Amino acid sequence: MGEIKIDLTQIKFDDLDEALFLDDELILKNKNFIFAKNGSGKSTLADAIKKQKENEYDVHIFKGFESVLGENEKLNAFALATDGGENQKRIEELEHDKTAKEISKTQISDSLKEPIEENADNFFTKKKKAEKRLLEKQGVIDQFLYESGKFISSHQMPTLTENPRSYNKNSFKNEISKRQQLQEVEISRAKELLKSEPRLLNTYDFSNINYKKYLISINEILQSKVEEKTKIVRLNSQERINFAQRGLELHKHDEENICAFCGNEISIETIEELETYFSADEVKALKHRIIKGKDQISKEIERIDNLKLNSTDFYPDFIPEVEDEIQNINEQTKIVKTFLIELINSLEIKEKNLFSESSVLEISVPANIDLFNFNNLIKKNNEFSKNLTAEQEKARAKLRYHEIYNLVEKKHYAVMLNEQENAQENLDEAQKNFQFELTKKIALENEINNLDVEIAALQPKAEKQAINHINKKLSSKVLWELDFFDDENSGYYQIKQDGKCRGVKQLSTGEKNVIAFLYFIEKLEEMKETPKKNKIVVFDDPMSSNDDTMQYLIICELQRIFQGNEKNKFIPDKDFLIILTHNVHFYLNVQPHGNFKDKKLDKTDKNNPKLKEVSKYDKNNFYRIQNRSFKLITGEHEDFKTSYEGLWIELKDLYACGHKNSMLNSMRRIIETYTKFNSIDTKKFYKGNDEYLKLFNVNSHSIDDLSAESFTEDKEQMKDLFRQIFVDNDAGSHFEKYWEK
């Protein structure tokens, strides 16, 4: 037993995003019987089944005679076809269209092949000429690439490739995008690099000095002075003290002791007095500090002077940057030396002015000489030296790209490419035009093939077998039979009765419906060209206003189908049948009759299999659409017993939805059925009650009047009045039985 699911959430109200049904899905078995009043969505459901399942199944839907029987009022005949009918005039129009397209196709075909005339021009010749022109331009470029590749590979002093034998025209072509013009200095530098040998340089360890402490120490010395231990009255100024000190230095070892300034004799006492004055401990200490400071500063100046930097030992690539950095360091050196010299000069002045405080130096303290960048350049140079081979290959590549640049410019390679591009564009245009015409030709061929298919589909088909089957089924039910219009190949039919023909205009709706229904049944066995699929067959309200005889015929045909009597049309355990109807009588009679229950072994519990009763409600699915939901009927206690009971169920559904006009229609039908079955005079049933007559009298209003009439009673009042009319006729229990049920 098979099962399929229909996604109900995809079925929407027209122009609304809200789902038509409240359930998420509908489960269908091989045979399904669905009862629903008109307007509840039966036709919409049928369309949704086709939309959701037509890729997996061969879906057939019967929606009445309009979907099968095509009326031709001009011929007063009808066609039978699942896809409608067309006449011979349409076929002639298609044949005329086909001839015109074949002429166009021939003309295009001639333009796409070599012309017979020697100088003729068409899409074929234009494409050939463009192809030839492009090959010529490509040949010029190939020759240039070949010669240029050979020039690069054979170049000497220096060689421009690491492996000249492997360098060819493709190598040259691939490197054109890398071409770059070099300046003379760059060329010289690259050539020098190719001649270079590995060279490693030592970095400079030039420690930093705290020049601020230098300045502080010097200023401390300048602010120092010697306090006189022995007072010499005549040395009452710094100038005289300096003069005396210098004189002592000049005459200290002079035996004559004659003053060089005044020529007088200097006494031994004077010399001893001055020696005592200038040889005091404080004087010695201050002099020592000055001498030590001068010595330390002189050594720093010497250390700076010994800092000899040059760029000659660097690789060519680094020389410009190294020279810039040397100039920067020289400027730093100059600032530092100026500072140090000023410190020495201040000490030399202080050396002559020991007995008085000197002014402090107020000068800026220079930064230390920064060799960080210079040492980094040395490291880069050394790293470069370690990677010399790779760097030399880079230099070789630069020279090669320079030569490629020269060759490309000299031979006007850009012009060659432009000419090739123009030739390619001309060919593209020619191919585009050629392909456009070829596409037109293919499109015409497809159109012609489609016309052939359409013409074949419209050609009158031999339906004699189907017509014979239909007539056989109708022979015991009606006095007429189907007959071909004009001849068997026309594709149109009429009704024939007592040797006379009736056209489509004289057919009743019931006659059209039963003819269309039987033809639909016959077409179920038609083989499709596509690979065989299981079928889904949907009958959407197959009953119309047929008489009882036709209803019986339709019911019998449907039962033969789902009982498996015609497996060429429907296979019960593989195919799916869905019967949708609003007719309670039809619903009750079309389904499998009786409540017989089979015995089936239930193996759900493998250790304890049991016999289980299986009814038609287990084998098939029965549904009733109520308030936009699918109610699954699981047993006879939930299903209709009679058509009369169905009227009561319909009334309760309308009551739940609040459809007052439709409620009145159902109430009248119930009263009509009840009174006829019980042989009750309707006048007596209404008891002369005006309110009863106004609402429930079947003969007082037509359906159209009922729909248009306005009345004040709400649904509860209508229910109470309907109950009361049964109570007034001693049938209150009858109302309660069916309403509660």
Image: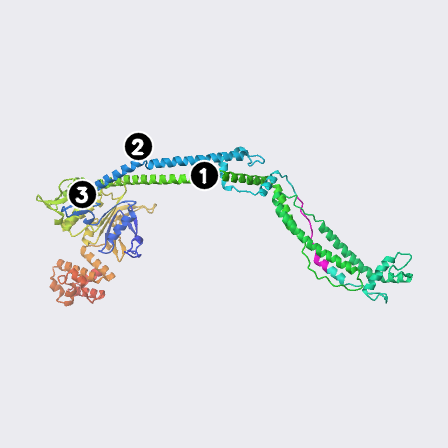
Q: Are marks 2 and 3 in contact (CB under 8 Å)?
A: no
Q: Nearer the viewer, residue 292 or 332?
A: 332
Distance from Cα at disc 1 to Cα at disc 3: 63 Å
Query: Which numbered marker is on residue 89?
Result: 3
Magenta residues span 201-215
Sequence-earlier tag: 1 or 2: 2
Sequence-earlier tag: 2 or 3: 3
Q: Main secondary structure of the magenta part?
A: loop
- Please tell me which residue is depicted at 18% across the width and 60% down the height of the picture: 665
Report the amino acid beneath label 3. Answer: Lys
Q: Where in the figure is residue 223, as x and y percent of width and height? A: 76, 63
Left or right of residue 634: residue 229: right
Q: Where in the figure is residue 703, as x and y percent of width and height? A: 16, 60
**Any magenta on residue 203?**
yes
State which quarter of the image contains the N terminus: top left
Q: Nearer the viewer, residue 538 or 553?
A: 538
**Number of the front mark, 2 or 3:** 2
Distance from Cα at disc 2 to Cα at disc 3: 42 Å
Report helix, strand or loop for mark 1: helix
**Colouring style:** rainbow
